[in-house]
Amino acid sequence: APAPVVAALPGARLAATTPIPPAELEALVDGVVRQSMARDHIAGVEVAVVQTGQVVLKKGYGFAAPGRLVDPDATLFRIGSISKTFTWIALMKEAEAGRIRLDTPVNLYLPEALQVRDQGFRQPVLVRDLLGHSAGFADRILGVLVEKDPNRVRPLALFLREERARRVREPGVLPTYSNYGAALAGESVSWVEGRPYQDVIEGEITRPLQMAHTTFREPYPARGDLPPPMPGALAGGVSSGYLWTGAGFQPQAFEYLTQVAPAASASSTAGDMARYMLMILNNGSLEAASIYGADTARGFRTPRLAGAPGVSGIDDGFLEFAFPGGFRGQGHAGDTLWFHSEMVTIPALNLGVFVTANTDTGGALAASLPERIVERFYAAPQALPRPGSAELAAQGAVYDGAYLTTRRPYGGLGLFNTLLKGPMQVRVTGDGRLVTEGGENPGAWVPDGPAGRFIQTMGSEVSAFRIENGRAVRWYAPSGVVAYDRVGPLRQLPALQIAAALAALASIATIVGLFTRDRREFRQTPMQARAGQVQTAIAALWLVAMALAAAYGFEARNPAYAMYAWPGPFVLVGSACALVAALLTGLTVLMAPAVWRGGRRVDSWTAWRKLRFTVSTLVFACFSALLAYWGALEPWSG
């Protein structure tokens, strides 16, 4: 029987059941990609679009290496966190076979050395918590996730033991993205299967799907403690990653991710990812290969966990995407330092889109191309921004403030680095729009339905606030895998800047005072002499620490520096200097009463000198307390 005729949405060009004309699709994609490559300075791009069981478009643009053009069937791009979708499929296959149960503790499927400790929490982490990014782990990236020296690459199990994630909340409560959780899930599959993770993926997914140019292996020298490296035939086809310097494209070192392979190490081509999407849209089967069953397919399309009603959720590991016209998709984005990718399938349209770029500037293209395709053919283009709300305009006090991401370290130098970047700022404008600046989704929003829920003024993504006692305390980002908690002024950059400026002035004044005192100010008791010497040392240490912080800031202009070198000598030595300065400041606080008692008038500091000493001590003490609150006095923490 012929398929039923389904009317197009008002203003849309095509009904949901009508395939996109291939020539029109190619013209749209060519225009968007080439414009983005020119505007954003992107070296190379691959795109694959599938629909109704066919590959509609598969194309490469630009170059992968000097003298080598991008070939969509043979040039491997790093697809980052899209790797996680392979891990979730492998995990669900174990669940289908009865070897892993989703509602049991993940510790049942891990060797003792890798099991998740309770760390003071009552509930164990379940397998399902890993699928939903809700295990309650803090997130660390800098200095641990990526390596550029192949000699520093660690086996997955060793990484999981040495970089054990800190638990910061009960599991199953709040989705917060976790590379560690995904890596742990991959290790559980490996442990149950009794073979390396890479072997599992090849045997269960890529080989049956004939994805010959997809691999989780990387081109490091062969080592006995690591899985065999990427075959030479594939390694020769890997695209370089590029940094746009403003004057040209600068090739970058290979980003090794084997230590977190289940979370991020895959490389693939547009041709292979087209087959992958066809399998997903066909409920786990492609040609003669049956990868997973109908129940698992439904799970990958069924919201299991969302931070707030209306916000995109997580479908057994696959992330939800909101598209124009009310369409929902499932898939994943993938970002490394130099590669940016997105893979999404939209069942209602029987459509799949994969896009990847090999330059640090390619994120906007990867994020926007699938939406541009859906909007052009299946939804009415949004001509004007949604209007603001007069009611919202009067509610600035409810929402205005700073909000800090839940995807972060919760202590030590990692927390300090997060706070230095600054929290997301939220403000309500006079024309009734809510503006988010910084954070995951900067933009403008207007109310959408229940109190606290918002939709983009231009776009289809939804976010929401949790409101307690008439005040917003948490923002749920539209991705569904991160939230932002409201923080007070002491967790905001102006507080640190003011305290640092005062400490710098006090330090400079202390040292300059050594050379500008008149003869009367050299009179002092032995206690005052020792106190003065200690405060001079403190001043020198603060100035050294600040100079090292400035040197780190200069180096960190290149994003690779922090990723690979964190915390590095500048941060470690600076933190150690600050710690010693803080401890010595505590000593001067204890010495202050004796300084004020002094001795006979002719043998003691003047009142003015005592006051200067006391003021400097208070400034140093406040600065020390703030740095401790920010985690900056823990050089051992990394």
Image (tube, rainbow, N blue to C red):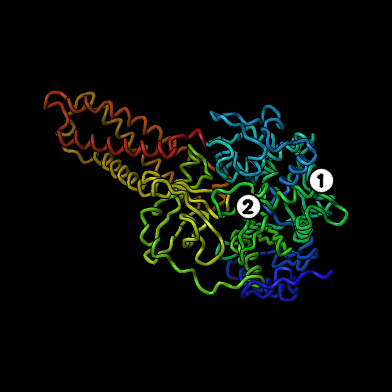
- The residue tagged 1 is 204
Label 1 neighbour load within 10 Å: few <14, some 14-19, many 20+? some
The residue at 65%/68% (across/down) is: 374
Q: Where is residue 473 in the image (x, y as percent from the top left)?
A: 43, 47
Q: Residues within 10 Å of mark 2 (few under 14, many from 20)?
A: many
Question: In front: 477, or 545?
Answer: 477
Height in image: 579 above or below 5?
above
Disc 2/disc 1 C-alpha distance (Å): 25 Å
Sequence-wise, the earlier of marks 2 and 1 is: 1
**Going by the picture, which residue comes out furthest to the right?**
288
Q: Identity of the amino acid at label 2?
A: Thr
Q: In this view, does 290 lie above or below 55?
A: above
* Of the pair 468 and 612, the residue shown nearer to us: 468
What residue is shown with label 2? 336
Q: Quadrant of residue 40?
A: bottom right
Residue 395 position, x and y percent, is: 37, 57
Q: What residue type is labelled 1?
A: Glu
Q: What element carries label 2?
A: loop
In the rendered image of this protein, does residue 117 appear above or below residue 46? Answer: above
Q: Are marks 2 and 1 in contact (CB under 8 Å)?
A: no
The circle on residue 323 is none
The quarter of the displayed image where residue 183 is located: top right
Tell me: 325 left or right of 613: right
- Rendering coords of residue 617 (x, y %): 27, 35
Q: Relative to 502, is 356 on the left or the right? A: right
